[in-house]
Image: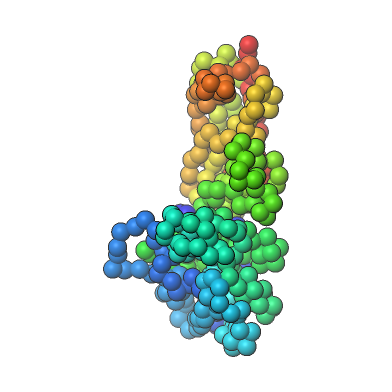
Amino acid sequence: RQSVVMLKNADRLLPLDGSRLRKIAVVGPTAFDHGVLLGNYHGYSGTLTTILEGIVNAASPGLQVEYAKGCELAGGRPADENHIRWVTGGADAIIAVLGYAPSLEGEEGETGDSEIVLGGDRRVLHLPGSQLDLLKKLHATGKPVILVLTGGSPIEIAWAEENIPAILAVFYPGEEGGNAVADVIFGNCNPAGRLPFTVPASLDQLPDFEDYSMRGRTYRFMTERPLYGFGYGLSYTRFRYGNLRITPARTNGTEPIEVRVEVQNIGDMAGDEVVQLYLADPVASVPAPVCHLEGVMRISLGPGEKQDVSFVLQPEQLALYTDDGEPFVEPGEFVVSVGGGQPAAGAGAVTGRFIVAG
């Protein structure tokens, strides 16, 4: 449950109140697929709960759950509109479970070659096969759609971000993954996962495969705005950051620096917050990251509760590197941002500065 990332929740569609619903439709090729639970490195379990099974388990008495695969994982015919109308007819909400499976991403020899993959490498970033077509047809029903994404790598979903009100990234969620996903959908668990990678807005944002420089690679060197940044994730509650303190404010670069911040849950639901500290050296004399994560802490807060969070930056965390790989700490001003995500990601970050004297 801790790894589920909520990417969007327009008009607070989630969590669903099962007691107010009569019928939900679960549609998608990875909803009832045991293979998307464990990825491609795993042991074997006698108990595997798919996402569909988890939703059925969590459904309130009297709530009807209707299921359709909708389309194949990759390839195959487009989704049948008549069948979709039959499955979703009378539904109060639709849960679309789409994405990738280990058969489409993994090491060379595991995935084969297709229009989606080549020797274990992804050829595309978008949803495979006719899954996007299925999602558009579900959206066209006019019913609220919750998109649940499976997979172990970034998926370009710009159309979904613009048109689908609620989106969850669940990755390969484990043997009890279906129950975990359902707990988030129905509000038994407040999501607090964060993206472990950057999701580009399109393939055009990625540097050429043959360009081995770091320019444009990862959140540390990317200057364009991605669809979702590294460290991004939403919650059912809201958190406020304040009272940032940096000690000492001036240093010679050989002593630890303490960063303290106050975090408060200002919403009406208990939840976890993943507090992230990013460091930047904006006037570095050599190529340097736009920012880099140097501290992370997960905390739990009830409604209205506050907590003081402390990080300690060691001198080596301020270092740049010569072409020979030798570290050095450069005099100048450093920028510290602490929040629920990257400084520019609308994560309520607070920012401060300290000086390294020459």
Q: Residue at x 51, y 52 (%)?
A: 193
Q: Where is residue 17 in the image (x, y as percent from the top left)?
A: 55, 72
Q: Position of residue 243 (x, y in %)?
A: 62, 33
| Vertical comparison of 277 with 264: above or below | above
Q: Position of residue 283 (x, y in %)?
A: 69, 24
Say left or right for 53 vs 352: left
Kindly tell me whether residue 157 is visible in this rendering.
Answer: yes
Of the 4 image quadrants, the one containing the C terminus is top right
| Vertical comparison of 78 with 113: above or below | below
Q: Position of residue 212 (x, y in %)?
A: 59, 38
Q: Nearer the viewer, residue 339 or 270?
A: 339
Report which quarter residue 128 is drawn in. bottom right
Q: Residue at x 61, y 36 (%)?
A: 213
| Vertical comparison of 130 with 192: above or below | below
Of the 4 image quadrants, the one containing the N terminus is bottom left
Report which quarter residue 261 is drawn in. top right
Say left or right for 151 vs 134: left
Kindly tell me whether residue 268 is visible in this rendering.
Answer: no
Q: Which of 306 and 110 is in front in this view?
A: 110
Say left or right for 272 vs 228: left
| Vertical comparison of 355 with 38: above or below | above
Say how the picture is coloured. rainbow
Q: Nearer the viewer, residue 290 or 144?
A: 290
Q: Residue at x 45, y 62 (%)?
A: 111
Q: How many marks?
A: 0
